[in-house]
Amino acid sequence: MLALMGVHLAVDRLQGFMRQVTANGQRRAWYLQLDIRNYFMSIDKALLWRLLEPRIDDPDARWLTELLVFHDCTQDYVYKGRPGELERVPPHKTLLRAEPGKGLPIGNLNSQFFANVYLNGLDQFVKHELKCPHYLRYCDDFVLLSPDPDQLSEWRERIREYLWTERLLRLNPTRERLRPLSDGVDFLGYIVRREYRLVRRRVVNALKARLRDARERLVSVREGVAWYRFDAPELERLRAVLASYLGHFQAANTWRLWRGIRAAHPWLDVYFEWDEAARKLQPRDAMPKALTRACQQYAWARGRFPGDALLFQVGAFYEVYDRRDAVLARDLGLRALRENPRHALYGFPERLFGRYLSRLLALGRPVVVVAQGEHAWTGVRERRLVWRIVPARIVAPDRFIARLDGD
């Protein structure tokens, strides 16, 4: 979250610079965007330590920092990936093929801090030597703005010389851009313009690919029936992915984009509710542990999918508690297990699940299945949503079934 906040603040600052250098759109200006080639793999550890050591007075902190800087992560490591995946990493992206004495592990918090220390000299050079008033750097991606493109060209060559002589780094020629600000700046996942910003197409396409992969793991269509599987670990991963992308989207002009994504993926509505006020997705399958009675759990599941037939497991039976389901139970030929003045209790043995599910689908009813787990909450068995099963004749929110059949 802190990293995401940092990205948003950086983009906010860039937009402020764009308004300043263009006098709120009254004059033309240009931007120079530069990137360092293989930055983390090119950091010289000895040079980094020379920058850090004079500023650390405490001997214990000095010892620990030196250990972190010079530790060789390529020795005695534990590999947890699938066989062969490591060989697919490009040589310039892995410490296993970095030059001796160079490279920091990407992702470590201390590496991020060290990487900023390593380029602090560049910041001072640009601000005090080049005297560029509109300069912004996020890790190794940095932007300079000016109303004079020739000035930007000169600064680029001086930056190139500084990075090599002072930090043993080279610019990435494929990532250099010197363009009018009116083109927009491709920065930190956004296309940034003076008055608005958009999400990069590559970011949107990456989300769509993640959604397609998740749909293939969670949703299947067999003989015109859509089966939605409530797999808790898979749904938690999907929720985290969506939360990350939504956080990124909310810092840009993306209302129509998000509406279009939801329209293209209506299966998401089975698993999540969209909180318009908070602009967040709430999972439908998170049964509160405060529900300590089976009838409370039944009512919670019924409220999640009010129009569906609910098959609720209690021991070796699937039971119906709600009087709204009594007519359906009679249509299925279920006899009351017991009756009281308020309602009748209907059910059938677990071994007949397939038979009654088929009858419900033949009646055109979507079905939600709540299964009983091994653990108990304060004496009541843990239960969770495991399936939502929808016949093809149900149009909304399952209009994508026909497209799935054609995939």
Image (spheres, rainbow, N blue to C red):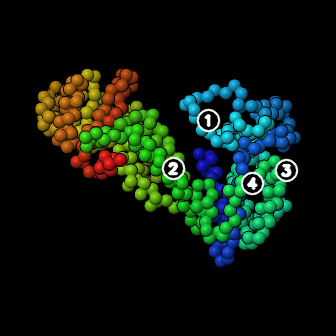
Q: Is residue 77 above or below residue 104?
A: above
Looking at marks 3 and 4 on the same chain, the residue that comes earlier in the sequence is marked by 3
Q: Residue at x 61, y 60 (%)?
A: 186
| Residue 137 position (above or below residue 21) | above
User: Disc 1 to disc 3, how far (Cα)?
Assistant: 33 Å
Secondary structure of the residue carrying tag 2 is: helix
Disc 2: which residue: 206
Task: Identify the residue shown where x is 47% and y is 48%.
Answer: 209
Vertical placement of residue 19 versus 63, above or below: below
Q: Amino acid at mark 1?
A: Glu
Q: Amino acid at mark 4?
A: Leu
Please state which amino acid type lies under the numbered disc 2: Ala
> Mark 4 or mark 1: which comes first in sequence?
1
Gap in angstroms between the C-alphas marked 2 and 1: 23 Å
Which residue does the numbered mark 3 point to in the structure image? Answer: 166
Q: Position of residue 401 (x, y in %)?
A: 30, 47
**Which residue is outermost to the bottom?**
26
Residue 222 image position (x, y, % from top left): 28, 39
The secondary element bearing badge 1 is classed as: helix
Q: Is residue 292 left or right of residue 26?
A: left
